[in-house]
Image: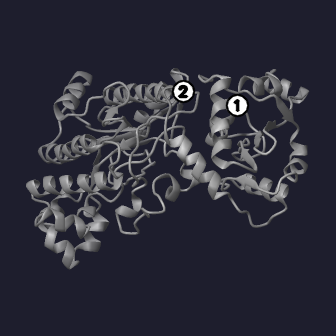
Amino acid sequence: MNTTNPFDAETFTQRRQQLKQQLGEGLIVLLGNEEASMNYKDNWYPFYQDSTFRYYFGIDLSGLTGVINIDTNEEIIFGPEQSIDDVIWTGPLPSLASLAEQVGIKKVMPVRKIADYLKSTKKLHYLPPYRPEHELKLQAWTGKTVLEPSLQLIQAIVAQRSIKSDAEVAEIEKAVTYTSRMHRNVMQFAREAMKEHEVAAEAVRYAESTNNLLSFPLICTTQGQVLHNHYRGNTLQPGDMLLFDGGIQTPAGYAGDMTRTIPVGTTFTERQRELYQVVLDTHEAAMAALKPGILYKDVHLLACRKLTDGLKQVGLMRGDTEEAVQAGAHTMFFQCGLGHMMGMDVHDMENLGEQYVGYTPELRKSTEFGLKSLRLGRALEPGFVLTVEPGIYIIPELIDMRRNDKVAQQFINFDKLDSYRDFGGIRIEDDLLITENGSRILGEPLPKTIAEVEAMRQQAL
């Protein structure tokens, strides 16, 4: 069990009070997570607490459920007390009552009493279950086979958790600084003839050595055109680029998420330099556009235009930039979204529904190729934390699929693009806080210009 918590009881009390005020009536049920077995009951995956439960109740322990009864102004944690068997296998832990007191909860009850307690209300609020055990519990407690998650609760939690407090920003900044240092280690460690998994192991070593977790499974690959590539069996060869996308999660549950792309040797090749600069210029332009009130969808489209301009200069695209982006021609190279919200989850609150976290009833998510992968489209507000991560991904199968498409032929130079079929992918990603007047990059700076990256590689090799 992790007992590290940078927030005091008053913080959690205020969070719950705000949630009660937003909903006004009813009973809120927030489920914590259970241990998850790998291949038999007592062989567990590393425990990961539900982030919404952690946000309001703060205890990093399995088997808990938090209840907020707005009508009676009662707050309860339901969970097991430690048994002698637990002591034998895990050692003594603080009592549930003492842990609850640390987060401002005065009442704890055994799990077996929760079903009867929930019957005391006619208006029950709960979230969409994303784990099967959550669904089974809710079905058993409510007597319903078809669950009805509370849209009002989803919207209230998204509104509250989207705006990060100063204390949360400080914790995220800590996570991003650790993330930056992990990346720096990888950039200095990678060598020709290594396997990708050897490089990834250095990142895991750093996370463990700093008493942190990884915020998501690492992407460490010479095949950067595969967006979520978790295969790590390739050998780093001369002329390759290594794309490393990784993040640190602090014991308090807050995440960092950064990406850098480096040459396996000491310098980029000429065509790698050209396309890397296109991505970097796009990255800088998108970050410069961030400010309260602007739609992140519009920042994404600005990035698409900037990327298209750069690809035209290299000779891979042609024609009118605006027409090319409207036609989706740029998605030959940039198939995903520009970024996402970040906080306690690396894709913050995504289990509540992208349509609620990244969009609004007035701004619906697109179904178009490219735009359908944009997780965040809504207007930005001070206190939002998000990623900016443009890239170029040259996917041979996509080239072949679009070769005879008349719209693609209008904007893409297929003759030249064919010579890039083995190019791979480039991504550059930083984490930013939206401020009252603009934005700022979080965490310790990490090299990203061509000169900075090559200088680091020359020092390492």
Q: Quadrant of the C terminus?
A: top left
Q: Quadrant of residue 30?
A: top right
Please count the marks in the image.
2
Task: Identify whether 289 is placed above or below 410.
Answer: above
Residue pointed to by mark 2: 212
| Image location (x, y in percent) of residue 111 | 86, 42
| Image location (x, y in percent) of residue 357 | 50, 52
Colour mapping: one colour
Q: Who is closer to the viewer here, 137 or 332?
A: 137
- Horizontal placement of 111 versus 284: left or right? right
- Horizontal placement of 331 versus 253: left or right? left
Residue pictured at 29% horizontal, 61% vertical? 395
Residue pictured at 73% horizontal, 41% vertical? 35
Secondary element type, mark 1: loop
Residue type for callout 2 = Asn
Which label's residue is closer to the chain start, 2 or 1? 1
The label shown at residue 265 is none
Work out whether residue 423 can be spotted. Answer: no
